[in-house]
Amino acid sequence: MTKVTASFENQIVYVGLDIHKRSWNAAIYLGDQFIRNIHQPPAPSALHHYLRHNYPGANYMCAYECGKFGYWIQREFKQLGIECLVVNPADIPSTHKDEVYKTDSRDARGIGQSLSNGQLSSIYIPQEEQQADRHLVRQRKKIWRDLVRCKNRLKGFLDYTGIEVPTQYDNANWNRNFINWLTKLEFEHNSNRVTLNYQLTEMELLRKELLSISNTIRKLMRSKRYNKLYYLLRSVTGIGPLTAASLLTEIGDMNRFKNFYHLNSFIGLMPMEHSSGERELKGRITVRKHRQLRSDLVECAWTAKRTDPALALYYSEQIKRGKNGKAAIVKVARKLLSRIRYVWLSGEPYQPAVIK
């Protein structure tokens, strides 16, 4: 008896993937028709084998939510000849029912259906080298946060044990004199002294790690890959070496943003808008953001306001119009972002404005 094999030439099989560490749930769509859900091992090769065996000759397209598993899955699918989109979870259409009755199968079906309907687009996939550099810059931020937490724990310990910090040391500047004062503190009970010693050792270790990784990042930015753009960004008032490194590794290619509006939206400096009919209301800053870059740019805006006369004037004008300090500094951050985009695309350093 001759075995008949179905042919799926010129047809597209869409696959929505719900990714987990130990297994994947895949929702299979043939065109816009749902076929079935399958559970499979967490490997692109397993899905590739299943699709070739069950839907020979078809074109395959899949999608999964970006998250802790990064981009290696997309890259392996690409090597296997399968187009794969990595999508922002916020861009996947959903209903209240989807949120109430949430399962892996429903999540996979939601992605698969949206993919088959042409409703999904991929986020930016960085080159592997850029991704590695991005990890390095992000690691520095994590070490910095750990150092801040360590200092806060140490301050809390002093408050709890009734130790009053001298006025000259009661500030954010932890200089060597303050550290020496801490090492010479005397306690009634030795365990308190030992506890403080452990906290000081942890803090010193984090300070050394922060200094080391900061120097490594500066060296990386002076390499041929980044050198030109790095110094162009540094020409913008308020942009320091580490913020420039974050911008370069997180954005990668400025040309992926069609205009300033799209870049501004990516960073998250846009106001939320509620429009209906002839009414157009703009509210607070959007909740969708690139957390690190928005935070960095707002911090840089405070520095720029103090050192750039044009931005200082712009900030004061916003205050006079009734904006509070936070809203005004966000507007300054947008100005900074516009300057960053200009020098990046033009290849020319920023020339500060002259106020007469």
Image: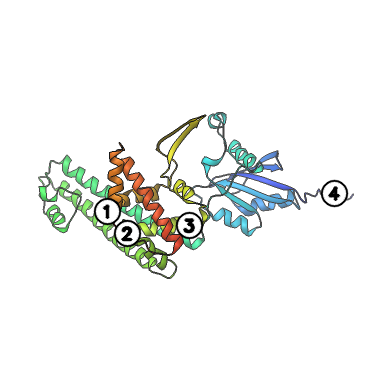
Q: Which mark is residue 4?
A: 4
Q: Which residue is mark 2?
A: 352
Q: What type is the residue that disc 3 sits on? A: Met
Q: Are circles 1 and 4 on residues that touch, CB within 8 Å?
A: no
Q: What label sits on residue 254 in the rendered view?
A: 3
Q: Which mark is residue 309?
A: 1
What amino acid does circle 1 point to?
Pro
- Real-space Cα distance between discs 2 and 1? 9 Å
Write down the quadrant of residue 208 in the picture.
bottom left
Q: Report the mark closest to the observer, 3 or 2.
A: 2
Q: Amino acid at mark 4?
A: Val
Q: Quadrant of residue 120?
A: top right
Q: Residue at x 16, y 46 (%)?
A: 192
Mark 1, residues whose alpha carbon is within 10 Å: few (<14), some, or many (≥20)?
A: some
Asked if the residue under mark 1 is in contact with the one under mark 2, i.e. CB atoms within 8 Å, the reply is yes
N-term-proximal mark, 4 vs 2: 4
Q: Position of residue 298 (x, y in %)?
A: 34, 48
- Callouts 4 and 2 close, C-beta under 8 Å: no
Foreground pick, 281 / 89: 281
Image x and y of residue 189, in percent: 12, 45
Residue at figure coordinates x 67%, y 53% from the top left:
48
Q: Closer to the camera: disc 4 or disc 3?
A: 3
Residue type for callout 2: Pro
Pointer 3 or 2: first along the chain: 3
9 vs 48, nearest the viewer: 9
Label 1's element?
Answer: helix
- For mark 4, give the secondary structure: loop
Q: Is residue 145 visible?
A: no
